[in-house]
Image (tube, helix red, strand yellow):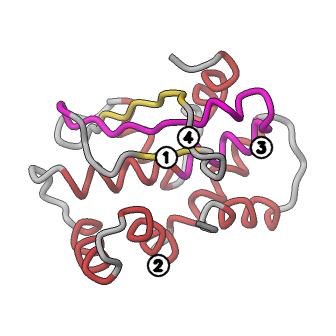
Amino acid sequence: DLSPCLTEIVEDLQQIATGGFATIMQQFIGHDTYPLNYNWKLIEGPLDPDEIGLTDPDLKPGYIAITTLNSNYIGTSTDLSWAKTIIHEAFHAYLVSVYRDHTLQDKTYKNLLDLYHKQYNGNANDVHHVAFTTTEIIPQISMALQQFGEMRGYDLSPQFYDDMAWSGLHE
């Protein structure tokens, strides 16, 4: 249920083969056995004007993380902007999946999130953004954006992609 332009962007993002984002996408696509596979659903819908994407902090039945992409921006945002948002929200969905799925044995992110959760009054977005900045997530977002941009024929500086990766943390 995504528009054709968003579907094409998601399909291109699924082709990224290296880096942390690629590892997470492979877990969502389903090449590993449970519990390493996560369920992630992207939908379009209206959000507040200052939100281009939003991942629900709670898993839905079946361990499904749901991200809503703001339908008001379809047709007005660039492919790089949508790619940045989808990559950024993929990390949110991953953290929601790891944090909420109590069957997982690897709790590296969960322990980190528990600590931050206490410090940031339970605001999942703040908790995730702190995890983004204190781990290697921001450089992974930048790397994935650069790979996407190169697949699309863009010739932009690494600094441009770094700036885009950081731009999702303004809220």
- Residue that badge 1 annotates: 54
> How far apart, in angstroms, are the residues tagged by discs 4 and 3?
26 Å
* Residue for badge 3: 149
Marks 2 and 3: in contact by CB < 8 Å?
Answer: no
Number of the label disc, if any, that sits on residue 162: none
Q: Amino acid at mark 4?
A: Leu
**76 in magenta:** yes
| Sequence-wise first label, 1 or 3 | 1
The residue carrying mark 4 is: 47
Is 67 inside the magenta-drawn segment?
yes
Q: Where does label 2 land, which residue?
A: 134
Q: CA distance from mark 2 to mark 4?
A: 28 Å
Q: Residue at x 28, y 74 (%)?
A: 117
Mark closer to the observer (3, 2): 2
The residue segment tinted magenta is 61-88
Q: Nearer the viewer, mark 2 or mark 1?
A: 1
Residue 76 against residue 93 in the figure, above or below = above
Mark 2 falls on what kind of element?
A: helix
| Residue at x 23% of width, y 43% of height | 36
Q: Amino acid at mark 1?
A: Leu
Q: Earlier in the sequence, mark 3 or mark 2?
A: 2
